[in-house]
Amino acid sequence: MIDLTGKTALVTGGTRGIGKAIVEALVQAGAKVVFTGSSAESAEKAMVAFAESGIHTFGLGGDVSDPEQAQKVVDLSLEYLEKIDILVNNAGITKDQLFMKMKREDWDQVMDTNLGGVFNVTKAVIKPMLKARYGRIINLGSVVGSTGNPGQVNYSASKAGLIGLSKSLAKELGGRNITCNVIAPGFIATDMTEQLPEAQKDTLISQIALGRLGEGKDIAGAVLYLASPLADYVTGTVLHVNGGMY
Ligand code: NAP
């Protein structure tokens, strides 16, 4: 049992899917958690749903792709938490299309959210983390950042970019006891994968050694590990959690 009592965490994109499971797991492990959604409405709605299931956490709206909104979310989180020990950069989107048909705006939106968002939020968090000489930064990548995937030139590039960002940050920040790692999920049952046609889902499942899509809690377990003292000597790594598909 991992105990994070006394630790604080900010989780972006915690309203649903993988982020929601991460928020639940961190709170259940004893951490004090702030989560974000893309809007105040979605954060508020999720906060009520969390409270109804006994998960006490605080939700904030803010678009991570906008540096000013990211800064505001971090400032408000610091007011509530007083410090941020654990940052989980989870917010992400897809805008899938074959490269030949992909619009420049689909490329920009995915890069600005999945990669730019991590830059913006981490930039806002890093000063207090450096001052505290402690931090656990956990970035949500994807298996397709390593394998590529047709229809996901933008998404795969954003997730591959996240690996370079995280490995470099790990080297810059290690001396201050701040670790930075990537968790690369395979295919996890959330709204994001719900969009896939059934036939494509069946093909995907046939390529997964464990024979099923993952669940949010499968990824939340990896977050708990990287946030805990068990992983104090782990940094600059990519932890693949994909049921054996890669
Ligand atoms: P999801 O169910 O679509 O949820 C996305 C979350 O991100 C929501 O909380 C959403 O908030 C938030 N979000 C989206 N755009 C945002 C923005 N611009 N600013 C702030 N928040 C934003 O996604 P998921 O499947 O849980 O995926 C979570 C992470 O895991 C993503 O980084 C994704 O790339 C990665 N991942 C997922 C899978 C998978 O199979 N599902 C596989 C590999 C990697 P709202 O509710 O307000 O929209």
Image (cartoon, rainbow, N blue to C red):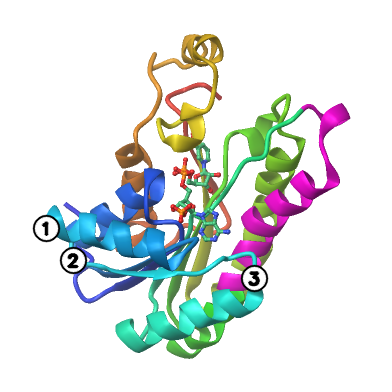
Q: Is the magenta stretch mostly helix, strand or loop?
A: helix
Residue 132 drawn at (x, y percent): 43, 87
Does the beta carbon of the residue at mark 3 sit less than 8 Å from ligand 1? yes
Residue 142 drawn at (x, y percent): 57, 40
Mark 1 lies on a secondary structure that is: loop
Does the beta carbon of the residue at mark 1 sit less than 8 Å from ligand 1? no
Residue at the spot 64% in from the left edge and 70% down from the top edge: 66
Q: Label 1 to label 2, Cα distance in Å?
A: 6 Å
Residue marked by disc 2: 56
Q: What residue type is labelled 1?
A: Gly
Please report whichever mark, 1 or 3, sits nearer to the chain's N-terminal start: 1
- Give the crowd class for mark 2: few <14, some 14-19, many >=20 residues within 10 Å: some
**Dots 1 and 2: beta carbons under 8 Å?**
yes
- Give the crowd class for mark 1: few <14, some 14-19, many >=20 residues within 10 Å: few
Q: In this view, does 181 lie above or below 212?
A: below
Extreme front residue here?
41
Q: Quadrant of the C terminus?
A: top right
Q: Which mark is residue 54?
A: 1
Residue at the spot 47% in from the left edge and 57% down from the top edge: 234
Question: Is residue 228 visible to us here?
Answer: no
**Dots 1 and 3: beta carbons under 8 Å?**
no
Please tell me in which quadrant of the rendered image residue 78 appears.
bottom left
Please tell me in which quadrant of the rendered image residue 231 appears.
bottom left
Residue at the spot 28% in from the left edge and 73% down from the top edge: 7
